[in-house]
Amino acid sequence: MPQLPQQASFPPRESGLPWLRRLFWLAVIVALIAGGGWGAKQWRQVRTRGEDVLTATARRGELVLTVVDRGELESAQSIQVVCEVEGGGKIVTIVPEGTRVKKGDEVARFDTDVLHKAISEQEVKWETAEGKVKTAQGELEVQKNKAESEIAKADLALKLAQIDYESYEEGEYKVELDKRKGTLELGRKELKEAEDNLAFTKSLVKKGFAQLEQIRVMELNVDAKTYAVSQQNADLKVLEKFTRIRKETELKAKFEDANRELERTKKSQAAATEKAESELNAAQKTAVLESRELARLRAQLDKCVVTAPEDGVVIYFARYWDEDSRIRPGLELHYQQPIITLPDLDNMQVKMKVHESVVKKVQQGQTATMQIEALSNQILHGKVRTIASVAQNDGWRGGGVKEYQTEVSIDDLPRDAGLRPGMTAEVRILIKTVENALTVPVQAVTELEGKYVAYLVSDGRIERQEVKVGESNEQLIQVLGGLADGAVVALDARNRAAAELKQQSKESGKDPAEIEPSPAPPADKTVARS
């Protein structure tokens, strides 16, 4: 069942000055007086049963529903300038608020003493890092030369060991073997010759041609030759079975050890070279980082001079609840803290807050009219641009009222009107138009015992009439059934319903407060024009 609105009741606002609130309600009264033409035509006073009754006539016509609220002008394309000095800084100078500036003009300047000190310290770090780079480069060159020398030395040792091994196996051993075999063969021949001489001498002694003593000498010679052959044969066997294996094993071990030494030298020198390269790379990266930091600090000097990115009017950024944050010379700002805004005064819009009770009716693209207090004699037109999806709650300042920020464009902004951000404007957003609607004033309908009723005035009598209602606003309510076009209704429906309930209470013996008629529900801030 639709509910009946009372007269306009806006959620209380705590922000703003008292004179602004008085000015707002004065404007509302003026608007009501201006719309009094409808009442002059529809309301009249009649006399019924000895009493004067204020009445109105049900009429058909166009019912225009709007959402009305106040807002502030702001630039639709405002550029915000923030502190770009990393770590923040102190404002030394800033142009006065309201100054017109052109793109590239200086608007503020930060203190640079701390930054200059940091740059000097960073220059020392960078020069130290550059010195380490040069030292590391020299050490790398020395290490590369050392690596080449050590590897060449180990490679030479390997080659010599290989030559020793191959020369013994294919040269020295064969020479020694042939030499000993030759000596053995010669000893055998000499032994054979000594044996032949001994046998010949013995034959001569038997024949009497030689002395017996000669045989003794010959036998000694044979024994000597036999011993020599035996010794030479043993030397040959030792060479073949032991000396050769030992020598080859020794030389092969030296060759393999030289080969391993070469590999160790290559790896150790490669590791030393890689370490020197790593130290050089680390020194170079450190130097690059120190250089970048120095360049960053020097770039911060340029950011200490704040210039206007576009043409505009300087507006100081302010937190109205924090007086200490007011932009002024000597204020310490942190990084990315807003300093000023440069609004485009040729492209303005109205920022307003729509109460949660009617925000569902506001849609993007709806047309709107607005009246700016600085242009009180001119109505401007626009459209709803955006409606916030999250409510703004001002906490204790807003009394718990939830509102949704809404932006409305201004399509016919006067170029020479001198409008500024922050000016107050009353906005009317067109919600719906009901054609051929039968309407009566909201005072003519009330809720009684769960039903909507009106008090019909006819032939000097006043009778209660149940009605069916539709759309409603602060002034009018649509009647869908129960009244005819031209019907005259009393405008004190609630008082009459209360009187009836009191009469019923007397008859039933109940407390009148228990059967008091329900008051009309609070208005949803929808205003109608008929």
Image (tube, rainbow, N blue to C red):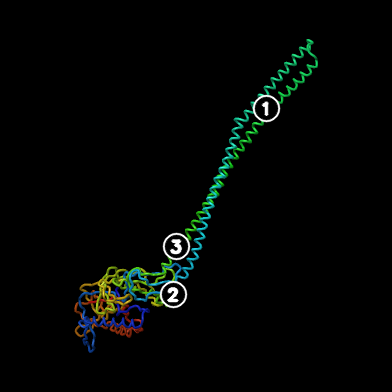
The answer for how far apart the CA atoms under marks 1 and 2 are is 107 Å
Q: Disc 1, disc 3: CB below 8 Å?
A: no
Percent of width and height locating residue 54: 24, 85
Which residue occupies the foreground of this view, 230 or 431? 230
Establish if 490 lies above or below 301: below
Which amino acid, by three-letter code, is at mark 1?
Lys
Which amino acid, by three-letter code, is at mark 2?
Leu
SS for dot 2: loop
- Mark 1 highlights which residue? 237
Viewed as shown, does residue 181 lie left or right of 94? right
Earlier-in-chain disc, 1 versus 3: 1
Q: Disc 2, disc 3: CB below 8 Å?
A: no
Mark closer to the observer (1, 3): 3
Which residue occupies the foreground of this view, 165 or 75? 165
Query: Which picture quadrant has residue 456?
Result: bottom left
Q: Residue at x 71, y 18 (%)?
A: 193
SS for dot 1: helix
- Mark 2 highlights which residue? 331
The answer for how far apart the CA atoms under marks 2 and 3 are is 26 Å
Mark on residue 295?
3
Query: Which picture quadrant has residue 310?
Result: bottom left
Percent of width and height locating residue 397: 40, 77
Mark closer to the observer (2, 3): 3
For label 3, count other residues whose C-alpha is less than 10 Å away and answer few (under 14), some (14-19) or many (20+): some
